[in-house]
Image: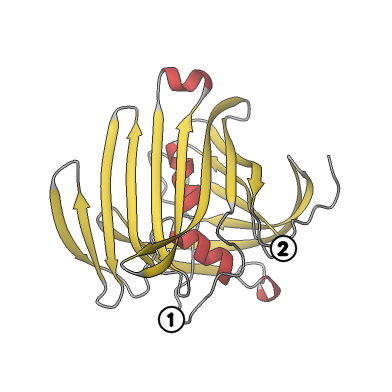
Amino acid sequence: MSKLLILLLALATMSSTQAQEAEAFQAGEWFRFEMSYSGFLKAGNATLTVKDDEIDGKPVYHVVGKGWTTGAIKWFFKVKDRYESYFDKTTLLPYRFIRNIDEGGHTKDIEIDFDQENRKAHINNKKKKKKLVVDTKPNVQDMVSMYYYLRNKINISTLKIGDEIKTDMFFDEENYGFKIKYLGEEIIETEFGDVRTLKFRPYVLAGRVFKEEESLTLWVSKDKNKLPLRIKADLAVGSLRADLDAFKGLKHPFKIIADN
């Protein structure tokens, strides 16, 4: 379940030096996702909340992502994750990222401060009481800010089937490259009714967790909000699915074809 939370937050983005003021979202936006294992067993919930904040005198968006197990699963594998990102309101580039997790007793408590101008990540691993500085890529994103940057940046009118979007992200102590492929449009049935969506294929590392690098599928609403409506992951054992089941504070009207 924790892997799916990470994927919900770290879908993909594009590198850019241009200012990208938020048009797809606003402070006050809130999402809740319901997660299920192999299509029938409830696995947990996750939320994403956007707030106005300030860091070092700069106005920022402060996004908090939380994930936790529910039902029978939490009795043999309990998850309680919290991710936070503080990113610039104009460039949408991150200044600070926080990861505080407990996944079946495996814990991490990491805070990263980004120096975008000098391309450095100042890492404070609070659990291990270790601090270090790592070089980053230009205009690097963290796993939370990158999702909001992509929502804001993507241009629906110019998308073509087969288009690939590449990005650079920094996570824990390393730089990562990600790629996502546009698969076309699809109407899906959701908690809110039938919705026209854009379908994507984020590429992942095949191995212990995922069956193959094309194990993920993502659907976002084809409107100005670009809501993350569904993500499915084929795992080495079974599958995970997350569906948006509640929201508030959208910046634009949510387009529904037919109500349930």
* Label whose residue precedes the other's in the sequence (1 or 2): 1
The picture places residue 187, in percent across and down from the top left corner, at 77, 52
Q: Amino acid at mark 2?
A: Asp
Asked which secondary structure carries label 2, the reply is loop
Please tell me how many numbered marks the rendered image carries: 2
Please, is residue 64 above or below residue 222 in the view? above
- Left or right of 44 on screen, residue 252: right
Q: Nearer the viewer, residue 72 or 232?
A: 72
Q: How far is disc 1 from disc 2 in space, using C-alphas?
A: 25 Å
Q: Nearer the viewer, residue 22 or 192?
A: 22
Give the residue displayed 15% in from the left and 42% down from the top. 128
Name the residue beneath numbered marker 1.
17
Name the residue beneath numbered marker 2.
223
The picture places residue 99, in percent across and down from the top left corner, at 33, 47
Which residue of the protein is positioned furthest toward the bottom in this rendering?
18
Please, is residue 57 above or below residue 71 in the view? below
Which residue of the protein is positioned furthest toward the right in this rendering?
258
Question: Is disc 1 surrounded by few (<14), some (14 to 19) or many (20+) residues within 10 Å?
Answer: few
The picture places residue 53, in percent across and down from the top left corner, at 43, 60
Question: Is disc 2 surrounded by few (<14), some (14 to 19) or many (20+) residues within 10 Å?
Answer: some
- Left or right of 51 on screen, residue 250: right
Which quadrant of the figure contains the C terminus? top right
Residue 211 in view here: no
- Left or right of 31 on screen, residue 211: left
Asked which secondary structure carries label 1, the reply is loop
